[in-house]
Amino acid sequence: MKSKCGFFGGVILVVMVMFLFSSMSVFATDDDTWTTKASMTDKRGNHEVAVVNGKIYAIGGYNGSVLNSVEEYNPETNTWTTKASMADKRQYFKVAVVNGKIYAIGGYNGSVLNSVEEYDPETNTWTTKASMTDKRQYFKVAVVNGKIYAIGGYNGSSAQLNSVEEYDPETDTWTTEASMTDKRYYHEIAVVNGKIYAIGGVDDSRLNSVEEYDPETNTWTTKASMADERNNHEVAVVDGKIYVSGGYNGASYLNAVEEYDPETDAWTTKASMADKKDYHEAAVVDGKIYTIGGRNVASPYLNSVEEYDPETNTWTAKASMADKRYFHRLAVVNGKIYAIGGRYDNSYLNAVEEYTPQITTSEIPTAPTNLTAIAEQYQITLNWNAVTDADSYTILRSTTSSAIDTVIASDITTTTYTDTNVTPSVTYYYVVRAVKNGVESTDSNIASAVVEENNNRALLLIKLLDENDKEYDLAMNDVDTFMNWYFDRGAGQGPAYYLFTKDYNTGPYLSRKDYITYDKIICIEVNEYIK
């Protein structure tokens, strides 16, 4: 007899490890190419995107009206799926990803917002969270040590902001932190070695000022200023240095590029881009910076792409997108860059394009080795050998060994992973890929495991607050399902009640059902027996 009040067991574990090496590679034979992909359902600009477990989420934005719609893109199948909408329509907002959850913060939908919503891709649900103190749009966010920082912006009441708030997802609380010296919006943010850098933007005029925030001491420090005042610029971080490109200085569009070294607190002017532009987007793959799209006076809308190599301080023109666009967003998955939505002239876009950069063999990280899969109670744990200089790992799974191509986790920074989304009696096959500078390795060896189905039965006794106890004679698999619901609900996931359908003593009734509410459960006892 086991209870929670104690817990239950009784699963039989079967483990298989196959040291076979897959020939699959994530790299296309044609590089420096754009490929048109499936379009979103909604046209959108001023939206935001987030990447969780290898899938891209396009959230909110504007296409003539403000949107709360959400779509998920799977690069493996080239399909978009409509997901649950946010409670609030919003543009000019920001998103952050912490522990596999997406947070939509602030923005504008006719008035400036301080509301916050959390999206769980596992359950496809949005949950309203604690609001910020300040309403804000045109602000920036950064994530450091699992906490989200909302920095600066504009509150819609003719007031630029220098305020900073910290959100802790664990406690669902916002804390007002030290303010910046300068009020700023249309600025940019970069994170290097756990410190946040606020760069440029607009107060009453364009700014070239830079401030560094240390979350450990809750202090801002004024740093060396850029040579150029600018807003609507882009930043990218490579090897601990910050690169600022383009923007607008109040009189003209810029192609100027500057590099900031936090170690020396010094800015260095670098080679300029070919195109002067603002509202472009930047992405980093394999240590190189790609500036994509945007606008300037001459075009005025751009589909051009430029690649910057920090090692040689050179810009190279790359293949252009099919569509000119600004107010678009970029996402990087498996070493490829996705340009999503945006605006061209007076039209909004739902078009999506995928860019494959030029990757040399020497730049591909080594594949992980010695992957093992161990089945435990209701989960399978993976372990593998570390790859030198790998930034992270991607986990893929399938129920066949011939095509292991479904990403179940990405941005894993340890050499172990536990898969809890498993079904008894199903054999799961896994591979792991190392990621360095946005480039993935080939697959590791294949490892597989199966949690064998338990054919035993049990008497499940549920003690309820202010109600009669409930007792059910169930197959252990049904007990497992109930307990999985119980623990998920304890983590804030899943429905608030569990349904038991009674198929005995129905009498004159069409059906008999018990709805067990989580908050009423005091204790659970499981008495397992062999039938």
Image (cartoon, grey):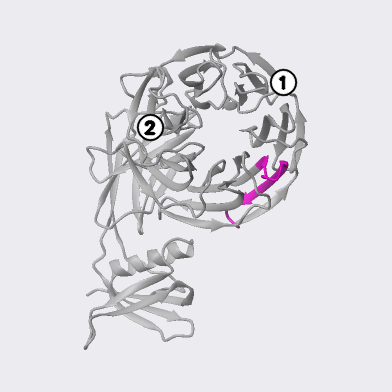
Between tags 1 and 2, which lies in front?
2
Residue highlighted by disc 1: 266
Q: Which mark is residue 93?
A: none
Residue ID at (56%, 43%): 93
Q: Quadrant of the C terminus?
A: bottom left
Q: Earlier in the sequence, mark 1 or mark 2?
A: 1
Task: Find residue 263 and report its image quarter.
Answer: top right
What amino acid is labelled 2 in the image? Ala
Task: Find residue 55 and report its image quarter.
Answer: top left
Specify whether residue 166 is painted magenta: yes
Coordinates of residue 326 in the picture (x, y in percent): 50, 28
Q: Mostly what secondary structure, the magenta segment? A: strand
What amino acid is labelled 1 in the image? Ala
Question: Foreground: 501 or 271?
Answer: 271
Q: Is residue 516 above or below residue 99?
A: below
Q: Tell me whether circle 1 and circle 2 mark residues in contact (CB < 8 Å).
A: no
Q: What are the residue bounds of the magenta stretch?
A: 151-171
Coordinates of residue 90 in the picture (x, y in percent): 53, 46
Coordinates of residue 68 in the picture (x, y in percent): 47, 49
Residue ID at (34%, 25%): 35
Provide the secondary structure element on which disc 2 rests: strand
Give the spatial CA distance, label 1 vs label 2: 40 Å
Q: Quadrant of the N terminus?
A: bottom left
In the picture, measured across the screen, residue 284 lies left or right of residue 186, that is left
In the picture, measured across the screen, residue 411 lies left or right of residue 188, that is left
Quick check: can you spot residue 1?
no
Question: Foreground: 244 or 353?
Answer: 353
Coordinates of residue 120 in the picture (x, y in percent): 45, 52
Residue highlighted by disc 2: 351
